[in-house]
Image (tube, grey):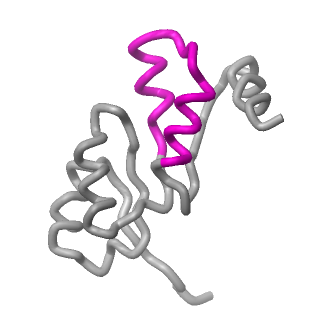
Amino acid sequence: GKIRHYGLAGLPDLIKPWIDKSHSLCQIIQTRDSYSDSELFNSFLKKGFEPQFTYGLFSQVSKSKRINHSEKILIDALDRNSSGSVIISTRKLSRLKELTNIFR
């Protein structure tokens, strides 16, 4: 097969130097989106680099407190990554049901 697209994956602070240089590897970006990284994440958007794959918003919140506002967190994640994929991983069936019920 042929490599059609290539990109960069990593934490926002590690990707920042590549984005600052507008490196060609920044065609596809996979990075963590979290409330603590929001300023850095937003700087990527302002420079025209919209991550195609984001993850981590739920895990940051669930480590700090119980998730009581799953719908708001999911909407925030989808708003911040409106043209890519938001990756959510869970081992808890109850959390998966809660998240899928948001779309019903």
Residue 65, compared with residue 17, is above or below; it is above
Q: Quadrant of the C terminus?
A: top right
Tell me the magenta residue range: 55-79
Give whichever of 50, 96 is nearer the camera. Answer: 50
Q: Is residue 91 left or right of residue 79?
A: right
Image spot of residue 53 (x, y percent): 50, 56
Q: Residue lying furthest top in this view? A: 66
Q: Going 23% across and 48% down the picture, which residue do you hit?
A: 40
**Quadrant occupied by the N terminus:** bottom right
Vertical relation: 91 (above or below) 84: above
Residue 62 image offset from top left, x and y in percent: 48, 18
Residue at the (70%, 29%) spot, across then down: 99
Query: Residue 32's quadrant in the figure?
Result: top left
Query: What residue occupies the far bottom of the structure in this picture?
Result: 2
Foreground pick, 91 / 15: 15
Above/below status of 30 relative to 100:
below
In the rendered view, tell whether residue 69 sits above or below residue 58. above
- Give the camera-side residue of 80 and 87: 80
Left or right: where does residue 70 sit relative to residue 47? right
Q: Residue at x 50, y 38 (%)?
A: 76
Number of marks in picture: 0
Report which quarter residue 64 is drawn in: top left
Q: Is 27 left or right of 101, judged from the image as shown?
A: left
Residue drawn at the location 60% of the way across and 24% of the way down: 70
- Magenta stretch, main secondary structure, is helix
> For residue 3: magenta?
no
Residue 29 picture location, percent across and down = 40, 63
| Place of residue 51 in the rendered image (x, y in percent of width and height, measured from the top left) | 42, 60
Quadrant in which residue 28 is drawn: bottom left
